[in-house]
Amino acid sequence: MLRRCLTWPPSNQFFCACCLSRRHCLCHEYFTTMAGPEQSPSPSPRSRVLVYILRQDVRLSDNPIFHAASTLYAGGMVDSQLDANCNPRNDSPLSHQHTPHFTHFLPVYVFPANQVEVSGFIANPADPSPYQEARSQIAGLWRTGPHRAKFMAEGVWDLKQQLENLDCDSGLQIRVGLVEDVVQNILDWYAGGEESTSSGETDVVGIWMTSHEGSEEKTTEARVKRLAKRSNVDFKLWDDEKYFVDDQDLPLDHISELPNVYTTFRKSLEPLRSKPRKLIPAPTHMPPLPPNIPPQESPFEIPSSLTGLTKALLSPLEDDLAHGLKHAPRWPENVDSAHPFGGGDQAAQNRLTHLISSGAMSSYKATRNGMLGADFSTKLSAYLAQGHQTARQIHWAMIDFEEGRGPGEDISGYGKGENDGTAAVRFELLWRDYMRLCARKFGSGMFRLYGVHEARKSSKWGADGEKGRKRFKLLNKSGGAGDNPEKTREVFERFRSGRTGLGLIDASNRELFLTGYTSNRARQNVASFLASHLGIDWRVGAEWYEYLLTDYDIANNWGNWQYVAGVGNDPRQGRVFNPVKQALDYDKNGEYIKAWVPELRGVELKKNTRSGNEEIDQEKLMGLYQAWRLPEDEKQALGLKGVDWVEQPLVRIQFSVGRGRGPQSSEPRGRGRGRGRGWKGGNKSNGKGSRRLGNEDKRKMSADGDEE
Ligand SMILES: Cc1cc2nc3c(=O)[nH]c(=O)nc-3n(C[C@H](O)[C@H](O)[C@H](O)COP(=O)(O)OP(=O)(O)OC[C@H]3O[C@@H](n4cnc5c(N)ncnc54)[C@H](O)[C@@H]3O)c2cc1C
């Protein structure tokens, strides 16, 4: 049943009315040429399946593999891999000579059993799971918590529906297990293994996947490659297209040349606006799924609805949602999540459109250090992390605004080129690239206690990576600083529960626990507090974030944690954020702390001046930032007497407002990652002496550059 093409593919050609193929069509089992007349049926050919293993590239748009599969199947050239100047890329991983001829395309998304707990997929609860629980190495926490699990499920389901809606027999298979086990199962099944019944007519001709910077993910890639080779199947690892500036356009011959300072890296690429490559169009037609598809291997079963999928992911976690915490945070009244967004390619595009048309993108530079509400920053991180969206999609949407196309006509700056907000977003997207490149450069050094210093063995950290370095308290044994691991575990529990006694830290940790999100400003303070004020192994903090963050991203999380902990690529080693000073700068009316620590909502901050005006009572504000400083009668009235985090805070920071820089006059100057706001040498946990910024500190702060 061949028809002449009217719209797609280009006219004067023929295509199969069922699957729209212009080439080898199995719907009616004949082979047709692109423009040739209808031919008589030939003997039934074997199906030739190209398998696409998806990980963090769960989207149809700007996806090189979907695009290539669609284009090649339709007999076209993969011509849309364009560089920033619209020139065809000469680095496409596809050459037509090396592309396997395929008749069917099998996209498979795998929930990897080493990272996501999959026991909730076991069909018969009496059956044991063949996999260990997906827990972190040091603190034994779940690796994927409920917020991200739900977001991932939504993204996968969205893609599945998009593929099914193309109406060309395409779709997405969902599997659980180790990626290599899933691949092995597919290969065995099609090779006619025991369990297959009607699969003998099919050959797997290729396995494609997108490369990833994580060391664990790299191991998976190597294993899949080995399996493919063993089965004589073509394996192709596609370049990651998720960079803002494509990694192939960097002025580096080898990753070892990546500068150890972000500023140097950024300067080598400016102006950033001119660097990203063009988008890859979303396919409108895909090759069909194979007629027979290997089932999920037992004992697991894949649910047939999004609700079922989410339930299977969440059920093992729900057994202990408090995660062993005696005082797990509870959702306070009258506060909204800053990140109420669902997962998926469509949701990502909607969010992006909202940011542009509401003006939030243009005002980003001014608002990005906020902590309350949905629009102070983009909240695109989770979409980027799961590959529901690419950085260059954000870039090109901003270009449209800057050049006066698309939404946002009413917003100031429309059609007037790059503005402070859009430039600042590009700046952050490049930070994200940089973290990914650091992950590539330092590999497993990202996860070591002494981070990249251990990997580098820098002289600063001692030629043997040991000498003169700061000691961290460990959870399982003494870290060498006379610490007691049992006590460290208790402190870590109070940290996770949002009961340290430091308002900003507790608000952020409670928000994170309950919503899966906390702002960049808060993250910096929390990480600094754990690593420097509490002196605890920063990696357990990173694991805690890995568990809870919806936007968890291996490079961004581990890279930022080690950066703030002073063992990463920070030119200003040893900075410490003062969470009281930071609260004064970024939560000067205490709204954020009151939102997430409801026990403190009753603290009355306003007082009348002699002239009858209202002003913030500085002493009360300090009591909000550290509740131990509240007057005794107020503690009594608020029911805070005897509460551990109020009366025995983990750290007491002596800090007072003065020298003309009271909160009303203190406008935040720094833009992030501690720049200008960090507090060097800040752990005053012994409570001795008042800490004010001396001239030396101020000098260093302004000289320290302005990088975020
Ligand atoms: C200790 C710590 C842990 C972090 N863990 C993660 C993580 O697991 N996943 C993650 O995506 N980000 C992480 N970040 C970076 C940053 O906090 C988040 O990207 C940001 O808060 C997400 O909110 P947003 O999308 O509104 O960001 P925006 O401020 O709107 O920024 C736009 C985008 O730029 C990128 N970006 C922004 N800040 C950074 C940064 N400091 N480093 C790298 N990329 C950045 C993100 O992709 C973000 O979506 C971490 C930061 C710290 C200090």
Image: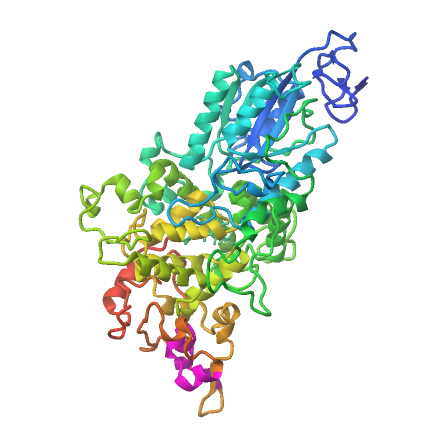
Q: Residue furthest front?
A: 126
The answer, for residue 2, to whether it is visible in the render is: yes
Above or below — where is 117 with respect to 424? Answer: above
Residue 341, percent from left and from top: 60, 53
Above or below — where is 395 with respect to 218? Answer: below
Residues in magenta, as a range:
614-637
Give the residue drawn at x 24%, y 73%: 688
Q: On the image, which quarter does residue 257 sit in?
A: top left
Residue 589 among those drawn in magenta: no
Give the residue drawn at x 54%, y 26%: 183
Q: On the image, which quarter does residue 529 sit in?
A: bottom left
Above or below — where is 542 with respect to 628? Answer: above
**Taking 644 as reference, is 50 left or right?**
right
Foreground pick, 360 / 653 = 653
Residue 633 among those drawn in magenta: yes
Foreground pick, 87 / 316 = 316
Residue 548, percent from left and from top: 49, 52
Residue 94, percent from left and from top: 53, 21
Foreground pick, 154 / 421 = 154
Give the residue drawn at x 49%, y 36%: 131
Foreground pick, 471 / 694 = 471
